[in-house]
Image (spheres, helix red, strand yellow):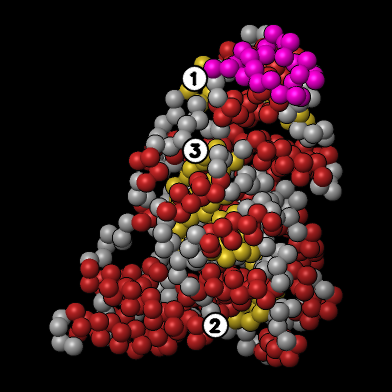
Amino acid sequence: MSRNPETAEDRRILRDVFGFEDYREGQEPVVQALLAGHNALAVMPTGSGKSLCFQVSALVMGGLTIVVSPLVALMHDQVAALRLAGVAAETINSSRERSENVAAWRRVAAGDVRLLYLAPERLMTERMLAALSKLPVSLIAIDEAHCISQWGPAFRPDYEALANLRETFPSVPIAALTATADQATRRDIAEKLFANDAEIFIAGFDRPNIKLAVEMRRNGNQQLLAFLERHRGASGIIYCLSRKKTESVSRMLTEKGVPALPYHAGMDKFERDSNQDAFMTEPGRIMVATIAFGMGIDKPDVRFVFHTDLPGSMEAYYQEIGRAGRDGQPAEAHMLYGLDDIRMRRVFIEQEDSGDDRRRREHQRLDALIGYCEAATCRRNTLLAYFGDDSEPCGNCDTCLDPVELKDGVAVGQQALSAVTRTGQRFGAAHIIDVLRGTETEKIRSSRHDELPTFGVGAALSKDAWRSIIRQLVAGSYLRLDIEGYGGLNATPKGNALLQGNETFSYRQDTMPAKAARTKKSKQSEPLPTLDDTGNALLSVLKGLRLRLAKERGVPAYVVFSDRTLIDMAQRRPLDATAFAEVHGVGDTKLRDFGDIFLQAISDTELTSDGYA
């Protein structure tokens, strides 16, 4: 029997509770699978509305839905958003007083709660499982499901225990949702969590609104400041490799008048939470952070993510840049990297307490990321191909917007490989460059490397040019960094073949962007094209009202209304409740709780703009 979308219960809830006229791409098949009682693994891009898949399903099914979430902040925000939409949601977690948790459990046990958010550590205790098994659990949803897999970018051993949920709730469908899972991770989740009994939905990985760019690090602080100059007044995240660098970059930006805050695991929890709250609620804030910040951060108007250092893997990079542009508006992901980054990442992998198989796989993942950094063709093609997605050249990355010219690099590649092999394959890039350029350092004299035939053969090229060539030789697997030693360069079999004339090598010349390119106004700085002057003025008023209401309720601003809802409001300019109900993202409860307040603000602004006030 065919389904009538006009009368289906899930679509009624979608409209009346959440205020949406239709599903986004990829959501409806997941909902239908869960409503049919099937397990589902959904891999969907960040910002595509994964949470709505299980939230709508939960309200259709009735009973209790258990939501497993990795972060207290994420639980708090989702519960707050559901409550504002009129949904009975609760969380029991370590950040709350015991009395609050007890009161929450009583509401759950009484059947007054539709969605209960728990961390895996609390859910998988004998006591909690025994208590929940006596209740009418209709659905289990596992957010950030890549944490289950040892191949995922944020593996958490506590998540592995979730595989035992099938035993406690054998007839309850389970939804696993993530934005970050390559093929190996997807297989691992399906096997561990579902014993391969699940429908798998892959909605694609592309985030076309995010401009992608990678740049060789020369003067990191100056490059960062030049980037931020193009994003004045915008909110963004700057990722740093270490806590120390996080502090120094944040301090430098503050001294330059940039509203930046630090965030890392070594900070006092109160200060960390205060900085996160300021970032989430105040416009134009910039967070300088280690990877301790980010999972579950659902701030829609993050206009950029800037990496001062190479991330850990392609998955980690994809997850981190996915925090930008969740509102669908133009955003930018910009990364700096250098050879030292590659060496440090190799060291981290080798020092990790894991088996040989995992280390081998992590090195391969890092190789893929280095290849992405060195890409001379469309960067988005390289990124999406890693996750198994095909795409055409995007026209929204640095290599598409400013195509790279490749040079025949056989001669310079052979020179570099000759210098590496003749010096004993134990020196790092700096010494090899000095040999190639004929620089008479004490180290070269004491090693008698000034007597080598290779000494000075590359004097015509600058240090920066040679650094770039060596980095691209490493990226192309002609050279390998000796991680167990001190970062010395070794020739690989492929490199030896190049040295003997049996391989080819092409490279791109790294040049500083032209001044015009550095100062070119980015897409993010443009005003929204759909609003006239009056609409933009009204939008500003509505954002101020939203911020006040959010602060009164102790929630992020987007939980009250998203930017998309406010833009729709500013376009429509509704003057009564019927018209207000047609605004995107306005459900019945928000119409009741916020309708009069926003209608009054719209009316006042209309009167002022018409000259009556």
Mark 2, Cα crowd under 10 Å, few <14 / some 14-19 / many 20+, is: few
Residue contact at pointers 1 and 3, CB within 8 angstroms: no
Eyeballing the image, is 480 above or below 160? above
Please give the range of residues in magenta: 436-460
Q: Which residue is mark 2?
A: 554
Where residue 562 sits, quadrant-wise, is bottom left
Q: Which residue is mark 3?
A: 379
Instruction: Name the image quarter holding the C terminus.
Output: bottom left
Q: Residue furthest left?
A: 611
Where residue 343 sits, quadrant-wise, is top right
Q: Position of residue 432 (x, y in %)?
A: 69, 23
Q: What amino acid type is highlighted by mark number 2?
A: Gly
- Residue at image position (44%, 25%) is 405
Look at discs 1 and 2 and give the one toward the viewer: 1
Q: Earlier in the sequence, mark 1 or mark 2?
A: 1
- The residues bearing labels 1 and 2 have C-alpha atoms spaced at a distance of 57 Å
Could you tell me if residue 17 is visible in this image? no
Q: What amino acid type is highlighted by mark number 3?
A: Arg
Q: Position of residue 208 (x, y in %)?
A: 43, 48
Q: Which residue is mark 1?
A: 407
- The residues bearing labels 1 and 3 have C-alpha atoms spaced at a distance of 19 Å
Q: 241 and 150: which one is in front?
A: 241
Residue contact at pointers 2 and 3, CB within 8 angstroms: no
Eyeballing the image, is 149 above or below 407? below
